[in-house]
Image (cartoon, rainbow, N blue to C red):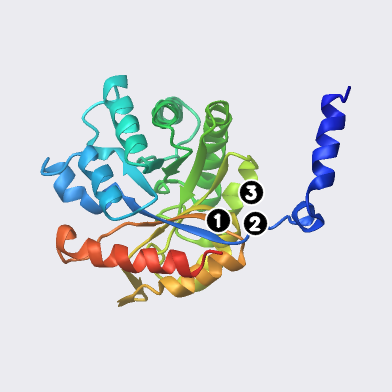
Amino acid sequence: MMTAAMQRRHFLSLLPAATLAASDPGPRLRPALCAYSFRKELESKKMSYEDVIRYAAEHKLDGVDLTVYWFPSTEDKFLYGLKQLAYKLNVEIYSISIRTDMCKKPGPEADKELAELKKWVDVAAKLGAGHIRVFGGRVPKDSNDAEASGWVVKVLGQAAEYAGTKGVMLGLENHGGITDKAETIVEIVKRVNSPWVGINLDTGNFRTKIYQQIETIAPHAINVQVKVDVNEDGVKSKSDWDRVSKILVSNKYRGYLALEYEAAEPALTAIPGHLATLRKVCAKYSS
């Protein structure tokens, strides 16, 4: 009688050698939508989070990032209702986005920030979201980048320990303040040194050397949000999603490209066209 180990070896012996040798699954970019794109509609209650999920399904998207700012509740009834709807519509709630400011010296304020982060880790876990977008925060006037970076490392590291127990990744976004420069973000993430921490790349948040900074971040990106426009040294232009995708693919990124719409044209009018483009870009750079 064959043991389990013998059965496994026999099964593997039947597989083609090329299959066993393959270690690179190839690029895959998945189209998604950030709920923040409908911030006006959510804030005014013209749209609900359920509507965002339905919208994503209607526009043939793989996932949604639910910015939590307008959540009416964090009770199980609401969260599990969203999870059930998303499952039925085959749309993944893969991420939530929260506000954080981890530039807090050790003490009550840092402890409060950590407690808030843990709360949202629990929410993400209940929704089945494997990722949370977090901010580093602003450097206090009586501090400096070096000191503030250390504070972020400590809070983020402690949050990561808890997030890991729930199976949730934390993505530190390039969002100004302490995360204004790509090299600083990478340094913070490396110092945290946790498998549960990476970078949430926002392609529209850098203001100088945009694509160069994106290249610096790309090897550490665990989620990507794309904007319609970029503003480099005061000059506004259309974001080059092809260029971004090439950078990501060359750095073996496999994951979501989520539209975070912030342009002037009304969201309900403009977003469908941008999502059509996004789907094409994702298909183009996926094997």
Element under disc 3: helix
Q: Secondary structure at mark 2?
A: loop
Query: Measured from the top left, where is residue 263 in percent x and y?
Result: 23, 65
Question: Mark 1 vs mark 3: which is more N-terminal?
Answer: 3
Q: Give how far apart the Cα atoms at labels 1 and 3 are.
A: 20 Å
Q: Is residue 166 in sight in this rendering?
A: yes
Q: Quadrant location of the C terminus?
A: bottom right
Image position of 106 (left or right of 205): right
- Report the residue marked by disc 1: 254
Q: Earlier in the sequence, mark 2 or mark 1?
A: 2
Q: Nearer the viewer, residue 110 or 129?
A: 129
170 vs 276, left or right, is right
**Residue located beneath label 3 in the image:** 190
Contact? badges 2 and 1 (CB < 8 Å): yes
Q: Which residue is mark 2?
A: 25
Quarter of the image for residue 16 reads bottom right
Can you say whether 213 is above or below 179 in the image?
below
Q: Badge 2: how crowded within 10 Å, few (<14), some, or many (20+)?
A: few
Residue at x 47%, y 27% (from the top left corner): 107
Toward the viewer: 83 or 187? 83
The type of residue carrying mark 2 is Pro
